[in-house]
Image: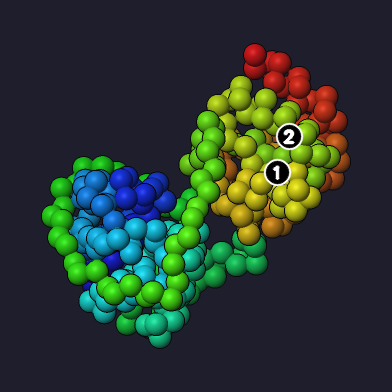
C-alpha cells in the first residue's frame, strides 16, 4: 500500500492543512508520497521533502498549473492515481474544489472529512453536523479521502525525501484563471489560530464587531463569526466558522453573542477551552462551553478587554 497526498501550497511553502493530511496518510499504512502541482514550485517541493514520514516527492510544474484550477489538478492526480491505494487531500476549499472530480473520474466514492483511520479500508467521518460519527468501509481499489485537519496532529519536520519531476498533463483549456483578490490581515489565519474570538447575530451590526476586534487584539487572536452574522452582512464570509464555513480547534475559543446552533457547533466544538458570553442562560452554546458568562455582551466584552490591558 502506498498513499499519495496532494499538497496544498502557494508555490513557495506548504500550507499547514497538508501536515495533518500527511499524518492521516501515514495511519493508512505503507509509504507516503507527496504530489506538488504548480509553477516555479521548487521551494514548496523542498519543504515537503523535509517533512517526517514522506518517502518521495513528485513535482508537476508548468505555467497552466500555477493557479490550481480544479480541472488541471484533477487531471494531474488522475495521471498518477492508479499506482496508489489511497489519494488524500486536506478538507479545505483546496481539496473540496478538485477531489470530487478525481473520485468521479476514477469511478469511486469519495470519503469526505475523515477524522480517524480505523484500518486501511475503514475510516470515521462526522455526519449530521457532527452529532454522529459514521464508520465507513470502502472496497474501492483507490480510496479517495479528504482529511479534517483538526482531527489529526500535524506531521513533524525531519525528513529528507528524494524529489522527482513528473510530466505535466495538458491544459484543460476550457477553464482559465482570470484574477484573484487576496484578503490581507495582521491577525492569525483562522484555521491555524491558537486563540479565536467570534461574534454572532447578538452583535447587532458590523460596526459592533469593533468590540470583538479589540478583544482579539489584546489576545493576539483571530476573529471569526457565526453564519447568522455573515448572512446578516456584519462581516465577510471568510470569517464564518461552522459546518458550511471553517472548521477550527484552537486552544481558546471565545463565543460572543452566539446562540450555539448545531451548524456553528460543528465547526468549533473541538476547541480545547470554550468561553461563551450570551444574555440567554438557556442558549445551546452553554452546553459545550467550559466557562459561561450570562449578561449583556456590550458590558462584558469591554470589561474583558480592559482587564487584559
Relative to 250, 298 lies left or right: right
**Residue at 58% over, 52% down:** 246
Of the 4 image quadrants, the one containing the C terminus is top right
Quadrant position of residue 65: bottom left
Q: Nearer the viewer, residue 40 or 288?
A: 40
Residue 165 visible? The answer is yes
Residue 10 — which label?
Answer: none
Relative to 197, 52 lies left or right: left
Local secondary structure at mark 1:
loop
- Residue, far bottom: 107
Q: Is residue 210 above or below residue 1?
A: above
Tell me where residue 173 appears, x and y as whole percent: 39, 74
Would you name the residue on which mark 2 appears? 209
Answer few, some or many: residues within 10 Å of disc 2's Cα (few below 14, many 20 plus, some between 14 and 19). Answer: many
Q: Is residue 162 above or below residue 145?
A: above
**Residue at 44% over, 62% down:** 177
Answer few, some or many: residues within 10 Å of disc 1's Cα (few below 14, many 20 plus, some between 14 and 19). Answer: many
Local secondary structure at mark 2:
helix
Residue 235 — which label?
Answer: 1
C-alpha span from label 1 to label 2: 8 Å
**Residue at 24% over, 60% down:** 61
Quadrant position of residue 261: bottom right
- Total labels: the figure holds 2
- Residue, far front: 178
Q: Is residue 162 above or below residue 183?
A: below
Tell me where residue 121 appears, x and y as whole percent: 37, 74
Amino acid at each position: 500500500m502506498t498513499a499519495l497526498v496532494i499538497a496544498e501550497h502557494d508555490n513557495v511553502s506548504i500550507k499547514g492543512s497538508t501536515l495533518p493530511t500527511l499524518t492521516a496518510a501515514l495511519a493508512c499504512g505503507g509509504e507516503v508520497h507527496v504530489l506538488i502541482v504548480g509553477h516555479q514550485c521548487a521551494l514548496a517541493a523542498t519543504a515537503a521533502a523535509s517533512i517526517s514520514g514522506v518517502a518521495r516527492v513528485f513535482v508537476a510544474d508548468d505555467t497552466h498549473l500555477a493557479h490550481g484550477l480544479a480541472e488541471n489538478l484533477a487531471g494531474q492526480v488522475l495521471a498518477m492515481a492508479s499506482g496508489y491505494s489511497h489519494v488524500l487531500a486536506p478538507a479545505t476549499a483546496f481539496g473540496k474544489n478538485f477531489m470530487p472530480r478525481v473520485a468521479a473520474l476514477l469511478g469511486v466514492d469519495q470519503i469526505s472529512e475523515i477524522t480517524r483511520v480505523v484500518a486501511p479500508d475503514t475510516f470515521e467521518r462526522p455526519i449530521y453536523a457532527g452529532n454522529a460519527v459514521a464508520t465507513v468501509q470502502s472496497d474501492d481499489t483507490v480510496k479517495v479521502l479528504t482529511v479534517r485537519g483538526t482531527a489529526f496532529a500535524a506531521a513533524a519536520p525531519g525528513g529528507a525525501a528524494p524529489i522527482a519531476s513528473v510530466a505535466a498533463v495538458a491544459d484543460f483549456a476550457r477553464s482559465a484563471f482570470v484574477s484573484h483578490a487576496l484578503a490581507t490581515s495582521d491577525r492569525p489565519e483562522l484555521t491555524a489560530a491558537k486563540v479565536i474570538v467570534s461574534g454572532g447575530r447578538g452583535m447587532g451590526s458590523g460596526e459592533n464587531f469593533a468590540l470583538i476586534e479589540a478583544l482579539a487584539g489584546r489576545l493576539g487572536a483571530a476573529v471569526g463569526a457565526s453564519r447568522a452574522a455573515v448572512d446578516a452582512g456584519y462581516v465577510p464570509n471568510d470569517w464564518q466558522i461552522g459546518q458550511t464555513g471553517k472548521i477550527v480547534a484552537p486552544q481558546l475559543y471565545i463565543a460572543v453573542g452566539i446562540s450555539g446552533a448545531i451548524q456553528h457547533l460543528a465547526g468549533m466544538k473541538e476547541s480545547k477551552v470554550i468561553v461563551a458570553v450570551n444574555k440567554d442562560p438557556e442558549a445551546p452554546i452553554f452546553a459545550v462551553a467550559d466557562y459561561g458568562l450570562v449578561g449583556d455582551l456590550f458590558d462584558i466584552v469591554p470589561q474583558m478587554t480592559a482587564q487584559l490591558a
